[in-house]
Image (spheres, rainbow, N blue to C red):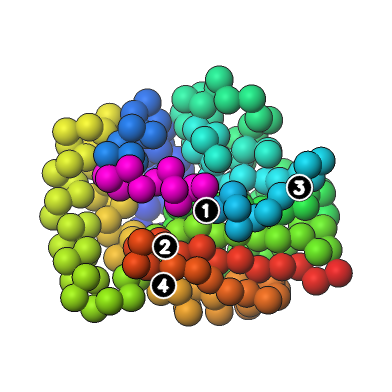
Amino acid sequence: MRAGLDKRPAEVAAMFDRVARRYDLTNTVLSGGLDAGWRRATREALGARPGQAVLDVAAGTGASAIALDFSQGMLRAGASRPVPKVAGDAMRLPLADESVDGVVISFGLRNVADPDAALREFRRVTRPGGTLVVCEFSSPTWAPFRTVYTEYLMQALPRIARAVSSNPDAYVYLAESIRAWPDQAALAARLQGAGWSDVAWRNLTGGIVALHRGRLRG
């Protein structure tokens, strides 16, 4: 994968299959309960209206709408949630051109082998005037805190995961992928390069997470 992470898509999918059983619990523990607020902010940023079709890519267990994920284990773990679910590839979405009003992806773009190809696919399936929201780990804005946060990622996070996750090794990959991910401005440039307009971002929790939003002009 990008940024020196060499897992193939099938390997990443299998890894998420193994963490699916306790995925939601592990995320809540590792984030100190902040994950619910991050997802709520993502939904608000999308601003979907009644009757609109929204595609949730890398939907995991469907906690956030059409839910799409490349991990069938994740989709099975969220089987009780009443949204249509599709196992598919973010770089080759099984949807027609201009078939949805918005696309949202939360903590999943890092796990796509070619994020730029995925961003172009999101544009393809979105109707003119539609919105893309990317919620992703990012770079804390205060340098001293960024140092502490990086230490947590590489040291404490895998240790906590060993206590609560069904596949703690996956969280070593998680820490490495977060550290290698582009910062806020660099990700905004990639959205623009994929054809999204009016791109802006909002930092959450001091930049641990950033919400990027773009629109598809009519």
Q: For the residue marked with disc 3, what is the amino acid?
A: Arg
Residue 204 image label: 2
Residue 100, position as x, y percentages in the image = 78, 49
* Real-space Cα separation, disc 2 to disc 1, in angstroms: 9 Å
Q: Secondary structure at mark 3?
A: loop
Q: Residues within 10 Å of mark 4 (few under 14, many from 20)?
A: some
The earlier-in-sequence mark between 4 and 3 is: 3
Q: Circle 4 — which element?
A: loop
- Magenta stretch: residue 39 in it? yes
Q: Which mark is residue 182?
A: 4
Mark 1 or mark 4: whose residue is earlier in sequence:
1
Q: Which residue is mark 3?
A: 49
The local secondary structure at tag 1 comes to helix
The alpha-carbon separation of the residues under discs 1 and 4 comes to 21 Å
Picture disc at residue 174: none
Q: Which residue range is magenta in the image?
A: 30-41
Residue at the image position 24 percent from the left and 78 percent from the top? 143
What residue do we see at 76% from left, 68% from top?
216
Mark 1–mark 3 Cα distance, whole angstroms, equals 15 Å
Numbered badge on residue 41? 1
Assign a secondary structure to mark 2. Answer: strand
- Residues at badges 2 and 1 in contact (C-beta under 8 Å)? yes
- Find residue 218 and report its horizontal and vertical position in percent: 86, 69
**Which mark is nearer the camera, 1 or 4?**
1
Looking at the rendered structure, the kind of residue marked 4 is Pro
Query: Residue at position x 29%, y 65% from top?
Result: 179
Mark 1 vs 3, N-terminal side: 1
Q: Is residue 50 left or right of residue 137?
A: right
